Image: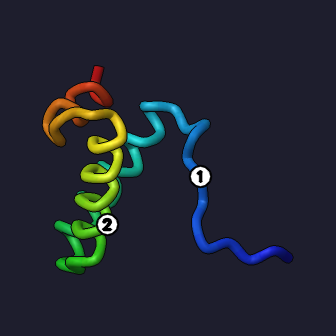
Amino acid sequence: MHEFEKISIAEMSKKDMLMILEALEYTGKNTNIEAFMNLKNSIIKELSLLADSSEDEFLEYLQR
């Protein structure tokens, strides 16, 4: 088996990405494990930078 340092999400749908972000937020809030919220925030930050938008604008885009 090949080992991966990073995994691409280039072919992921907006709906799937939003579901992952919502699942991370739900899990973080309901388990009080900060790592879930940190991961969600990190993903949003990176994707909004790639999209050249604010984090709020990017979340609105995913929700459309």
Q: Give me the residue at 28% from left, 61% from top.
A: 42
Image position, residue 64 (x, y; %): 29, 19
Helix, strand or loop at mark 2: helix
Kindly give the residue lying farthest to the top in the view shown: 64
- Mark 2 and mark 1 lie on one chain; the one further toward the N terminus is 1
Residue 39's label in the rendered image is 2
Q: Quadrant of residue 32?
A: bottom left
Q: Give me the residue at 61% from left, 73% from top.
A: 5
Q: Quadrant of residue 39?
A: bottom left
Q: Which residue is tagged 1?
A: 8
Residue 25's label in the rendered image is none
Residue 61 in the image: above or below residue 54: above
Q: Quadrant of the N terminus?
A: bottom right
Image position, residue 23 (x, y; %): 34, 55
Image position, residue 21 (x, y; %): 33, 50
Residue 23 in the image: above or below residue 56: below
Kindly give the residue lying farthest to the right in the view shown: 1
Q: Nearer the viewer, residue 62 or 52?
A: 52
How far apart are the alpha carbons under marks 2 and 1? Answer: 16 Å
Image position, residue 15 (x, y; %): 43, 32
Q: Give me the residue at 28% from left, 50% from top.
A: 44
Left or right, 23 with respect to 13, comes to left
Helix, strand or loop at mark 1: loop
